[in-house]
């Protein structure tokens, strides 16, 4: 079955201290929940974090108070309704097993295994021990028992983590690795991870060839394609905005996932906070927005829920989910088969760390800041790894610290420039050994002496005009070569001196010295440069002048080739997808709008969905459109077409709008 758009991830982590497990389960209640929620796919539990199975088992232990074959009953209802199913197995956590086999626990350096008497939480098991044999038996049993009745296998709490248990230490030494060396410990973690995924794949292929396997690790997608592709099938991107991920996380993960050539879904939750919150409900408007955002980022949807131990589904939860999924369902005709298009490729420092070891001095802040500017600037973009094809993008952005040593990456970037591509470099990206590796008439002179320094635009910078703006991150000095053929867009104005205990001025920092001004941001025909860790700055400070200075350079590099221009407010997210069929080409333009608020202890909340003003859009099209309309309303929009571009106005909307351009 193809990957549906409306999935539920049903948690069921249930302690042995709770009785009557599944005692209130009824087929009618489950059907009512699925129908109220507009659900066409669901992940159901075989084994939970506590380690219990929810079906008859010989490979594991059933929950001691289980009243029925809960998994089998749920599968039967889904079969009747035609709902796709995945089976969930907790792989990294199995608390009852950990109690009985503490020798199979993951061990920290120094011998800490976890304290069962003090810790009220789960203890991580190690796949480098004989526990892998136990897990494989459990997988084999559920595949055999329910063969032909489900469509995917979801394995949770996966990932590469170093372990110093006796088995891992012995394994490292057998391979000539030093357990006291962190790099060697990580190498062996990869050996263990590969062995685990290979064993699972062999087991699945022997019993149900081709069954999709999801190894759930929230960060795995950024660890390299060889890790990501150990998922056999689609990707499920766990990203609960209220659970610590925030509303910026999913668009960034999706911008990379959509370059990998597989379907993927965005997994949020119905909870006010995060997993395991019984009685926690987010506002229906938040879930409507999150589902629309997933679709606009090229994803299917998944919403996390946790079933009550007695097995009765809470219809309030599924009415909440249904408010969002009814809107997704109405748009699936246009979503299915469409593929997002992009002008810009943003090279992710997180994904380039193996090629550029110095690319992550500030964690992933530069990626976060760059992604946020892409969203707020309403650019069509993807996030790229070293294996991506560069030629499809009009512009590549190398953020802040991405040095380019000799090798394949440098050669490919130079070839990209030779064929007409354009680059934006910031900070020390595009340098190596203290020099630019690309020839654009500029010499790199290293890190600036003064912090903070001040950015002074050479034009009337929106919104506050031409003045000197404090900018706190690392800055860099450059000089222009004789014959430089480009335009200086911003100056760097240094302060009088750096702040020190006996040499300071005012409350925060020293003011700028007007005599210390030099070029810092410029653009040539193919290369733009900004001499600040400007994306890190935006992640940390969010200053308007930083964003608009970056937008200025990008817009000059893209020029008239920019696919989409829109006056959607900055908190809006927009995308354009192409859908080809026998009847022609459709451009699917999605717009999503909300303003998250931070409430409580740092929780990002969406409650109100204000109406936008009318939004004017100009879109490059392959030919003059035959028709432009809102979907699913089927309301025609007037438009004007000239010079390969169509202009139309999207009437003010709440939450989201979809425009279909029939080209």
Image: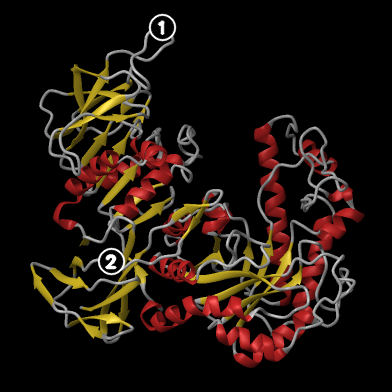
Q: Quadrant of the C terminus?
A: bottom left
Q: Residues within 10 Å of mark 2 (few under 14, many from 20)?
A: some
Q: Nearer the viewer, residue 510 or 441?
A: 510
Q: Nearer the viewer, residue 524 or 45?
A: 45
**82 horizontally vs 398: left or right:** right
What's the colour scheme? secondary structure
User: Helix, strand or loop at disc 2?
Assistant: loop
Work out whether 588 lies above or below 493.
below
User: Helix, strand or loop at disc 1?
Assistant: loop
Q: Give the residue drawn at x 69%, y 77%.
A: 208
Give the quarter of the image for residue 453. Answer: top left
Expressed as whole percent of the image width and height from the top left, the position of residue 475 reads 33, 26
**425 horizontally vs 620: left or right:** right
Q: Nearer the viewer, residue 281 or 362?
A: 281
Per the image, the residue denoted by label 2 is 612
Looking at the image, do the residues carrying marks 2 and 1 touch, with CB atoms under 8 Å apart?
A: no
Q: Which mark is residue 370?
A: none
Per the image, the residue denoted by label 1 is 502
Work out whether 393 lies above or below 363.
below
């Amino acid at each position: 079955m193809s990957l549906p758009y409306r999935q539920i991830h049903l948690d069921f982590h249930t302690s042995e201290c709770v009785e009557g497990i599944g005692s209130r389960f009824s087929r009618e209640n489950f059907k009512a929940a699925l129908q109220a929620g507009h659900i066409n796919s669901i992940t159901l539990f075989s084994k939970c974090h506590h380690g219990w199975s929810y079906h008859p088992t010989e490979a594991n232990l059933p929950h001691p108070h289980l009243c029925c074959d809960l998994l089998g009953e749920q599968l039967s209802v889904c079969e009747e309704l035609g709902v796709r199913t995945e089976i969930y197995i907790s792989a990294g956590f199995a608390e009852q097993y950990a109690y009985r086999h503490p020798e199979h626990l993951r061990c920290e350096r120094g011998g800490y295994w976890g304290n069962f008497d003090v810790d009220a939480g789960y203890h991580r098991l190690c796949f480098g021990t004989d526990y892998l044999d136990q897990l494989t038996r459990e997988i084999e049993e559920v595949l055999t028992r329910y063969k032909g009745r489900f469509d995917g296998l979801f394995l949770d709490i996966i990932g590469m983590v170093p372990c110093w248990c006796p088995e891992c230490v012995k394994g490292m030494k057998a391979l000539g690795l030093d357990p006291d060396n962190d790099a060697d410990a990580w190498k062996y973690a990869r050996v263990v991870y590969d062995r685990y995924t290979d064993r699972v794949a062999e087991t699945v292929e022997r019993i149900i060839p081709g069954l999709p396997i999801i190894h759930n690790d929230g960060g795995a997608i950024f660890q390299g394609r060889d890790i990501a592709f150990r998922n056999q099938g689609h990707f499920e991107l766990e990203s609960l905005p209220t659970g610590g991920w925030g509303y910026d996380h999913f668009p960034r993960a999706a911008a990379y996932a959509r370059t990998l050539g597989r379907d993927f879904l965005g997994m949020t939750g119905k909870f006010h906070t995060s997993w395991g919150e019984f009685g926690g409900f987010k506002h229906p408007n938040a879930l409507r927005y999150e589902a629309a955002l997933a679709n606009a980022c090229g994803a299917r949807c998944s919403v996390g829920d946790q079933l009550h131990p007695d097995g009765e589904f809470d219809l309030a939860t599924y009415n909440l989910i249904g408010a969002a999924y009814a809107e997704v369902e109405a748009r699936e005709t246009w979503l299915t088969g469409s593929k997002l298009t992009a002008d810009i490729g943003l090279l992710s420092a997180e994904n380039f760390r193996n090629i550029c070891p110095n690319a992550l001095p500030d964690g992933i802040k530069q990626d976060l800041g760059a992604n946020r500017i892409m969203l707020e600037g309403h650019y069509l973009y993807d996030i790229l790894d070293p294996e991506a094809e560069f030629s499809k993008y009009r512009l590549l952005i190398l953020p802040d610290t991405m040095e380019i040593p000799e090798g394949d990456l440098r050669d490919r970037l130079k070839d990209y420039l030779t064929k007409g591509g354009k680059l934006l470099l910031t900070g020390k990206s595009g340098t190596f050994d203290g020099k630019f590796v690309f020839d654009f008439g500029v010499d790199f002179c290293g890190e600036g002496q003064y912090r903070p320094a001040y950015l002074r635009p050479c034009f009337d910078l929106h919104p506050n005009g031409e003045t000197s703006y404090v900018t706190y991150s690392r800055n860099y000095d450059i000089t222009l070569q004789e014959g430089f053929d480009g335009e200086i867009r911003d100056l760097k104005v240094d302060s009088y001196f750096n702040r020190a205990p006996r040499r300071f001025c005012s409350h925060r920092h020293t003011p700028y010295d007007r005599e210390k001004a030099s070029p810092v941001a410029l653009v040539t025909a193919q290369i733009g440069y900004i001499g600040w860790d400007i994306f890190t700055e935006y992640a940390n400070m969010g200053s308007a002048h930083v964003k608009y200075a970056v937008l200025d350079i990008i817009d000059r590099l893209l020029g008239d080739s920019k696919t989409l221009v829109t006056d959607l407010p900055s908190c809006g997210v927009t995308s354009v997808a192409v859908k080809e069929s026998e009847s022609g080409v459709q451009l699917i333009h999605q717009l999503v709008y909300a303003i998250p608020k931070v409430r409580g202890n740092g929780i990002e909340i969406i409650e109100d969905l204000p109406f936008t003003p009318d939004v004017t859009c100009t879109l490059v099209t392959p030919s003059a459109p035959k028709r432009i309309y809102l979907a699913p309303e089927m309301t025609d929009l007037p438009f004007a077409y000239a010079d390969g571009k169509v202009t139309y106005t999207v009437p003010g909307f709440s939450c989201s709008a979809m425009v279909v351009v029939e080209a």
